[in-house]
């Protein structure tokens, strides 16, 4: 079934989609009157709908039933990933959204090889958000995870400590992840580094702010592998891969 997101709660019996979603339904999917689709709203609900009218610019649906969306994990994961070369972050964002992260924040650290200017970062963020949106639809998420603007690593401690538990994964070792994540944790911040890893002073600053230092095992993972491994482990330890 086609799966779409709207940015408002649905109180009426009918709703009209416009813009890219309407164009995608009418022109790409070639859906017709009488066909079914699902709309997800910011209040965490999914609405089963039937198309009642289709034009080139608008699609109107009738809401048949509404339930709480059960696709969302019990834990809110904020993923912080260092900038990487090329389009490596594209795949990380796609897979992280499929696994269930709530939001993603790229950051610039001392060993980042990629250092785009501000204009390029704006364009990248727009592309990354579109990748996240498509992944959320494909994996039947209940929300649209947000890709935030890139920040400097100096801003990272404050952003990460908004979560109940914040963990940075360090290539030089740390605590086992299972010792840091309880099954009933409500929110997690997971931090992974660039191709060159972290400088010791960066880890020290994160530790001083209250961020836990963890390991992902005895093997050194690539920058694009570590965040997916971290999110997968967190989802498993919180019972969200069952």
Image (spheres, grey):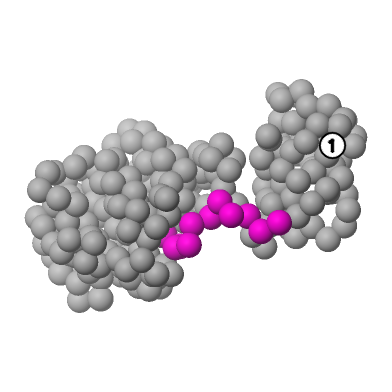
Residue 65 point in image, percent of width and height: 79, 51
Q: Which residue is mark 1?
A: 51
Q: Would residue 59 be found to the left or right of residue 68 on screen?
A: right
Give the prevailing secondary structure in the magenta stretch.
loop
- Quarter assignment of residue 166: bottom left
**Residue 117 visible, this angle:** yes
Out of 71 and 100, give the one closest to the viewer. Answer: 71
For the magenta stretch, what is the residue range? Answer: 67-77
Residue 133: image x %, image y %? 56, 43
Helix, strand or loop for disc 1? strand
Residue 120 visible to the viewer: no
4 over 171 or under it: above or below = above
Label 1: how many Cα within 10 Å (few below 14, some 14–19, many 20+): many
Asked if the stretch drawn in magenta spans residue 71, the answer is: yes
Could you say which quadrant of the image residue 140 lies in?
top right
Along the line of sight, which residue is nearer the eye, 144 or 150?
144
């Amino acid at each position: 079934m086609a799966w779409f997101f709207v940015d408002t709660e649905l109180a009426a019996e009918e709703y009209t989609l416009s813009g890219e979603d309407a164009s995608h339904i009418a022109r790409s999917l070639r859906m017709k009157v009488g066909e079914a689709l699902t709309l997800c709203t910011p209040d965490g609900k999914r609405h089963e709908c039937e198309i009642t009218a289709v034009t080139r610019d608008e699609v109107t649906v009738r809401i048949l039933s509404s339930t709480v969306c059960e696709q969302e994990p019990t834990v809110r994961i904020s993923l912080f990933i260092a900038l990487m070369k090329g389009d490596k972050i594209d795949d990380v964002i796609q897979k992280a959204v499929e696994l269930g992260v709530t939001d993603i924040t790229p950051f610039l650290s001392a060993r980042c090889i990629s250092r785009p200017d501000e204009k390029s970062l704006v364009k990248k963020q727009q592309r990354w958000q579109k990748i996240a949106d498509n992944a959320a639809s494909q994996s039947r998420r209940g929300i649209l995870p947000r890709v935030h603007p890139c920040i400097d690593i100096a801003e990272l401690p404050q952003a990460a400590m908004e979560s109940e538990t914040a963990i940075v994964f360090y290539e030089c070792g740390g605590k086992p992840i299972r010792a840091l994540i309880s099954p009933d944790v409500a929110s997690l911040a997971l931090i992974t580094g660039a191709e060159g890893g972290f400088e010791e002073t960066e880890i020290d600053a994160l530790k001083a702010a209250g961020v836990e230092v963890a390991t992902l095992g005895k093997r050194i993972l690539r920058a694009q592998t570590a965040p997916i491994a971290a999110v997968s482990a967190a989802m498993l330890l919180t019972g969200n891969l069952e």
